């Protein structure tokens, strides 16, 4: 892979930069100006920003043109994410399940009617989605899930419980995996459904996270009727669809860009935090740590480029996405640990307190970064995948 931009890619990069310069919401989405506090306001903000990206032609950049995307190459997509992170553009995490998981899954497995019904709405930020995979007894071992889907006439009737369902309380739709054949072998009896979250029989209980926010939820299904046409892929063939969704969830190749932008903030923090007669950045141990992060980020960037080049050749995110996920999530945590080490106890004061530094940004990030080694497959699970599917080690 060529590491410098070709003239065409440089033009594309400049196009992204100038659009962001002209359209970024005033002060929003940056650590100094966090997104709104109230959940409803954040939903409205995310939808409005996504609409702007859509109107500007930046939504679904790497989706195929016939699916409403721009058909950009993997490299162009990486360039977009690099510039997006450099500009500290808003994080539309609330819409990420639809854009990064459900959309690509429907492109791969959806019926024509499902694509027509949902894809454009997802890209325009009109539909908010959640992912109903995990259950109290099924996380890493997802195939042991027990939520039932019973075939009754033209409906599949769902009963059971999901947990850790991010954004369910705001979601319009859920990508839900259920067991439709309890007699079949574990992986063989599952089916994937598109469920309207306003269907009768669904109840949602938000769970408060240690950051103080309540983004994920328990979701209970009590005889919820789902039309048969909302089945994605084959009946009892849901595991194939699950694998597609998970490969998109783990294959994200631009986390290096987000962390590079955060390292700039960390260096700035070290330069302005008083330590003795000077600042924290004078301390050789702090400097060494920052240099270590910079080195690891360069390695992460090169690995992301290598993975992007492979994806461009094959069209399918491979198991090596697990190495990237493992590397960025653990580096993310060490960077947030370092920020709080630089700040000392003040780094642990949460937002809303007079003593909080940068309005509690570092405290929030320290706590939130713990989730990164759990969601989209824990670090232990990623190591298993690397051992078996990348390195070919025996079980
Ligand atoms: C912030 C956040 C958002 C989330 N959002 C969603 C969502 O929207 N939808 C959704 O469906 N789920 C969501 N999840 C759930 C997430 O997918 C699960 O937490 C994850 O898959 C782990 O499952 P578990 O919590 O049941 O832990 P378990 O699978 O019970 O694991 C417990 C511990 O055992 C280890 N372990 C398990 N199996 C093995 C093994 N084979 N080898 C070695 N170690 C092992 C794990 O690494 C972990 O340390 C979210 C999680 C978080 C933290």
Image: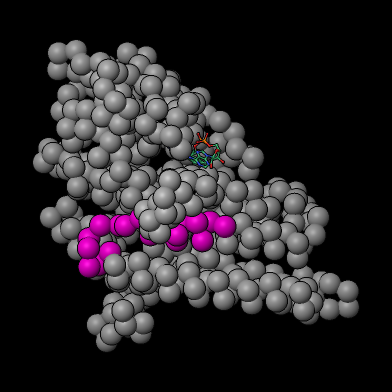
Q: Is residue 58 above or below residue 275?
A: above
- Say whether residue 312 is magenta: yes
| Left or right: 387 as drawn, with respect to 8 | right
Question: Percent from the top left, x then y, of residue 21?
Answer: 41, 73
- Residue nearest the viewer, comparing 297 with 15: 297
Question: Percent from the top left, x then y, of residue 225?
Answer: 26, 17
| Left or right: 220 as drawn, with respect to 356 | left
| Left or right: 10 as drawn, with respect to 384 | left
Q: Seen from this angle, which residue lies furthest front?
A: 394
- Does the rendering let one see residue 375? yes
Q: Residue at x 36, y 82 (%)?
A: 3
Q: Is residue 48 above or below residue 264?
A: above
Q: Quadrant of residue 193?
A: top left
Question: Percent from the top left, x then y, of residue 150?
Answer: 25, 16
Q: Residue at x 26, y 49 (%)?
A: 104
- Say whether residue 102 is magenta: no
Q: Quadrant of residue 18?
A: bottom left
Looking at the rendering, the stretch of residues picked out in magenta corresponds to 311-330
- Does the rendering let one see residue 42? no
Question: Percent from the top left, x then y, of residue 389?
Answer: 36, 53
Coloring basis for residues: one colour
Q: Residue at x 68, y 72 (%)?
A: 289
- Residue nearest the viewer, comparing 274 with 43: 274
Image quarter in which the N terminus is found: bottom left
Q: Residue at x 32, y 57 (%)?
A: 318
Q: Seen from this angle, which residue lies furthest right?
A: 277
Q: Main secondary structure of the magenta part?
A: helix
């Amino acid at each position: 892979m060529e590491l410098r931009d070709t003239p065409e890619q440089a033009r594309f990069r400049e196009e992204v930069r100038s659009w962001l310069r002209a359209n970024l919401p005033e002060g929003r989405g940056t650590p100094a100006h966090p997104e709104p506090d109230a959940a409803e306001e954040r939903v409205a903000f995310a939808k409005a920003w996504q609409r702007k990206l859509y109107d500007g032609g930046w939504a679904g950049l790497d989706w195929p043109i016939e699916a409403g995307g721009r058909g950009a190459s993997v490299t162009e997509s990486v360039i977009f994410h690099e510039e997006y992170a450099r500009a500290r553009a808003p994080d539309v995490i609330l819409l990420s399940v639809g854009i990064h998981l459900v959309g690509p899954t429907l492109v791969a497995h959806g019926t024509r009617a499902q694509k027509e019904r949902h894809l454009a709405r997802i890209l325009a930020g009109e539909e908010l989605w959640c992912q109903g995979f995990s259950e109290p007894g099924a996380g890493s071992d997802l195939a042991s899930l027990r939520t039932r889907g019973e075939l009754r006439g033209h409906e599949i009737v769902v009963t059971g419980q999901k947990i850790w369902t991010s954004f369910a309380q705001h979601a319009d739709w859920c990508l839900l995996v259920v067991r439709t054949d309890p007699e079949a072998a574990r992986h063989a009896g599952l089916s994937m459904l598109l469920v309207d979250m306003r269907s009768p029989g669904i109840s949602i209980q938000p769970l408060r996270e240690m950051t103080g926010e309540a983004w994920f939820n328990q979701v209970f299904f009590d005889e919820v009727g789902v039309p048969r046409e909302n089945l994605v892929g084959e009946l009892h063939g849901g595991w194939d669809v699950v694998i597609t969704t998970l490969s998109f969830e783990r294959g994200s190749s631009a986390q290096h860009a987000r962390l590079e932008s955060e390292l700039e903030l960390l260096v700035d923090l070290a330069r302005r935090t008083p330590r003795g007669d000077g600042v924290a950045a004078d301390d050789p141990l702090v400097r060494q740590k920052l240099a270590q992060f910079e080195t690891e980020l360069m390695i992460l960037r090169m690995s992301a480029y290598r993975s992007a080049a492979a994806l461009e050749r094959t069209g399918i995110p491979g198991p090596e996405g697990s190495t990237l996920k493992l590397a960025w999530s653990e580096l993310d945590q060490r960077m947030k640990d370092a920020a709080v080490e630089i700040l000392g106890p003040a780094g642990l004061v949460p937002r809303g307190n007079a003593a909080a530094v940068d309005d509690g940004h570092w405290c929030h990030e320290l706590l939130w970064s713990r989730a990164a080694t759990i969601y989209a497959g824990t670090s232990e699970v990623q190591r298993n995948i690397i051992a078996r599917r990348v390195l070919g080690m025996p079980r």
